[in-house]
Amino acid sequence: MNDSAPIYDDKAHVRGNLDLGGAEWIRSDEGAEDEEEHVEIAFVEHTDGVTYTAMRNSAHPDGPVLVFTPAEWEAFILGVKDGEFDEPW
């Protein structure tokens, strides 16, 4: 018996098919030196008409890229603003 929740993959059609070749990567320059690693994001439109948010590490531009749906990105931003990811003191 499997007690885990069902998995809904709303990016299955995007995974491996999102063209990042023309992505314009942006990063915050707040409080960091140019030589340091940065989180970079790009807003990339897919052939399904949805604009996805891609995220990568600037030190590894050819490395893994996280992809967020608009709803996932909004939830992430709201969590950041709410302090959900702050380190405990």
Image (cartoon, rainbow, N blue to C red):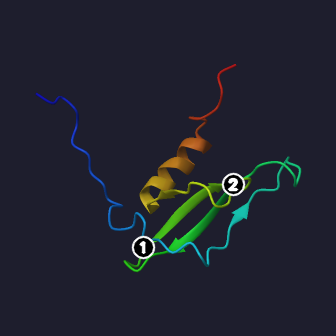
Outermost residue to the left: 1
Where does residue 34 sit, x and y in percent of width and height?
Answer: 87, 55
Residue assigned mark 1: 50
Q: Which amino acid, mark 2? A: His
Above or below — where is 24 with respect to 77? below
Q: Which amino acid, mark 1? A: Val
Q: For the residue labelled by badge 1, is the local secondary structure a helix, a strand or a loop? A: loop
Front one among 71 and 65 = 65
Q: Is residue 42 left or right of residue 59?
A: left
Quadrant housing residue 23: bottom right
At a point 67% along the width and 73% down the height, the residue shown is 24
At a point 22% along the width and 37% down the height, the residue shown is 5
Q: Is residue 70 left or right of residue 81?
A: left
Where does residue 25 sit, x and y in percent of width and height?
Answer: 68, 67
Where does residue 71 sit, x and y in percent of width and height?
Answer: 42, 57
Above or below — where is 37 with respect to 44? above
Q: Is residue 6 left or right of residue 83?
A: left
Report the Cα–Cα distance between label 2 and label 1: 26 Å
Residue assigned mark 2: 60
Tag of residue 38:
none
Quadrant housing residue 28: bottom right
